[in-house]
């Protein structure tokens, strides 16, 4: 099967090129750097002057989660360089801004997982150690690391039940791939259990490293600060298609109690904004699609956030937040959006029953009364009524809890990472 995967990836290479160009035309790829993914002549190798550590993270969440780790490594190790690869346009844009704090970090878009591209990329960059973040399991990359005898680790590893079942269709292949990893730091206890069944080695669960991201509240800006202070509102964050009607029904129920209630919807995929607008208008609701730096207009009931990077600026002022991708049955084995930033900023968090991706974090939040599961829009609206009747927002308790968990997770994770870098995991 591994041979088949290699052959198929080579055969499909021309199609991958076409797809990348089509994505570029649709504005989904960096217009200048998209070739880094498909042509070795655009790998843009930087001369290596110290031990090079390669972190591969797919998108924004994974990218942000490793920045504190790099910060800690720079404190304890003065002779390291870092290569960070990502795959999405949004993560590339964020890298331009966030990596300015480091003098020794380079960002590249990761080449697609074709044998000769990975071979060339690893040969040219010559990383001393490799970390794959979250669920980035690319067989050709992993096999090339083994070929060049480069130690490789999984950090914040996350396997869903669906992905585990797929790997177990070919258990010998799965074991061969996962046994290559020298270290596996898991994002949750369930992944640890799956990796044990796959006979991986050096498996640990020390907490989700996405807890570690510190938020500087003073740096959070929102051009609508005045209206957010004055209006009674709630936020539906990172929602998916099937949750649109859920949000609308919740708003209509709240409207029976609060005539001036405002519902802010921040869809996970902003290209859905127009469809949400049309749905809301079917219920005769006053809707506004909010672009970056625009003001929320008076007498608007439904505000649809239509730009990336907005959530933190709304979490800061929201008392109550519904976290999306948690009310969709078909996504029960991959449900749940990240509630950590909302918790860090003192929001009362509501979620549906399907929170697989962050079940360990939700468990802690629920035990400490910072989150609550709801089964339907009636339950959510009943809880929101209680929250909205009291306008006071207390952030101290949730901040203390998250900071405590983050400190322990970072400390325990760094011990494992430093041992790996010092070859103590073998």
Image (cartoon, rainbow, N blue to C red):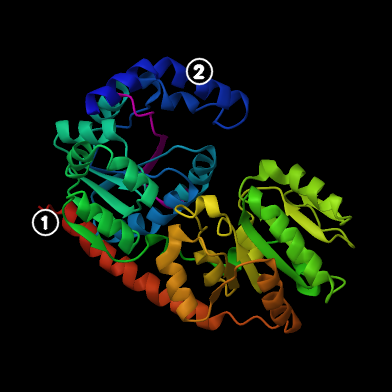
Q: Secondary structure at mark 1?
A: loop
| Residue 312 highlighted magenta (yes or no) | no
Q: Which mark is residue 424?
A: 1
Q: Is residue 302 above or below residue 387?
A: above
- Which of the 4 image quarters holds residue 386? bottom right
Tell me, yes or no, if residue 160 can be seen here.
no
Identity of the residue drawn at 15% across and 31% down: 147
Vertical side of 346 occupied by 81: above or below: above
Left or right side of 78 for 269: right
Magenta run includes residue 113? yes
Mark closer to the chain start, 2 or 1: 2
Measuring 69% from the left and 80% from the top, which residue is drawn there? Answer: 387
Bounds of the magenta span?
A: 100-114
* Neighbour tally class for label 2: few under 14, some 14-19, many 20 plus, Cα within 10 Å: few
Percent x, y of residue 286: 87, 56
What residue is shown with label 2? 18
Q: CA distance from mark 2 to mark 1?
A: 44 Å
Residue 243 against residue 4 in the figure, above or below:
below
Secondary structure at numbered mark 2: helix
Residue 393 x/y as whole percent: 65, 80
Q: Is residue 120 left or right of residue 351?
A: left
């Amino acid at each position: 099967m591994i041979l088949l995967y290699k052959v198929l990836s080579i055969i499909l290479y021309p199609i991958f090129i076409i797809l990348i160009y089509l994505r570029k035309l649709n504005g989904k790829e960096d217009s200048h750097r998209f070739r880094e993914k498909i042509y070795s002549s655009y790998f843009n190798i930087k001369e290596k002057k110290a031990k090079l550590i390669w972190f591969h993270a797919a998108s924004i969440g994974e990218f942000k989660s490793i920045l504190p780790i790099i910060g800690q490594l720079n404190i304890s190790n003065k002779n390291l360089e870092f290569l960070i690869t990502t795959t999405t346009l949004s993560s590339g844009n964020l890298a331009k801004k966030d990596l300015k704090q480091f003098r020794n970090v380079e960002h590249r878009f990761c080449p697609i997982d074709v044998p000769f591209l990975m071979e060339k990329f690893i040969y040219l960059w010559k990383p001393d150690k490799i970390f794959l973040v979250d669920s980035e399991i690319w067989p050709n990359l992993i096999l090339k690391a083994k070929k060049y005898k480069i130690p490789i680790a999984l950090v914040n590893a996350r396997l869903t039940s669906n992905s585990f079942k797929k790997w177990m269709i070919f258990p010998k292949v799965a074991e061969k791939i996962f046994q290559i990893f020298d270290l596996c730091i898991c994002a949750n206890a369930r992944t640890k259990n799956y990796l044990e069944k796959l006979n991986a080695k050096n498996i640990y669960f020390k907490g989700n490293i996405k807890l570690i991201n510190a938020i500087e509240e003073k740096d959070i800006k929102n051009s609508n600060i005045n209206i957010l202070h004055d209006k009674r509102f709630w936020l539906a964050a990172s929602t998916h298609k099937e949750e649109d009607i859920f949000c609308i029904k919740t708003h209509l129920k709240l409207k029976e109690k609060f005539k001036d209630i405002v519902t802010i919807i921040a869809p996970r995929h902003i290209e859905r904004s127009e469809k949400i607008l049309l749905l809301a208008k079917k219920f005769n609701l006053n809707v506004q699609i909010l672009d970056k730096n625009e003001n929320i207009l008076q007498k608007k009931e439904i505000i649809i956030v239509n730009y990336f990077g907005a959530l933190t600026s709304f979490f800061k002022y929201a008392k109550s937040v519904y976290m999306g991708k948690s009310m969709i049955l078909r996504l029960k084995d991959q449900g749940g959006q990240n509630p950590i930033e909302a918790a860090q900023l003192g929001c009362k968090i509501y979620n549906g029953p399907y929170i697989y991706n962050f079940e360990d974090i939700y468990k802690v939040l629920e035990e400490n009364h910072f989150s609550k599961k709801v089964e339907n829009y009636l339950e959510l609206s009943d809880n929101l009524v209680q929250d909205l009747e009291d306008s006071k927002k207390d952030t101290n308790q949730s901040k203390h809890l998250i900071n405590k968990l983050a400190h322990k997770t970072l400390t325990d994770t760094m011990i494992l990472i430093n041992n790996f870098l010092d070859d103590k995991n073998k």
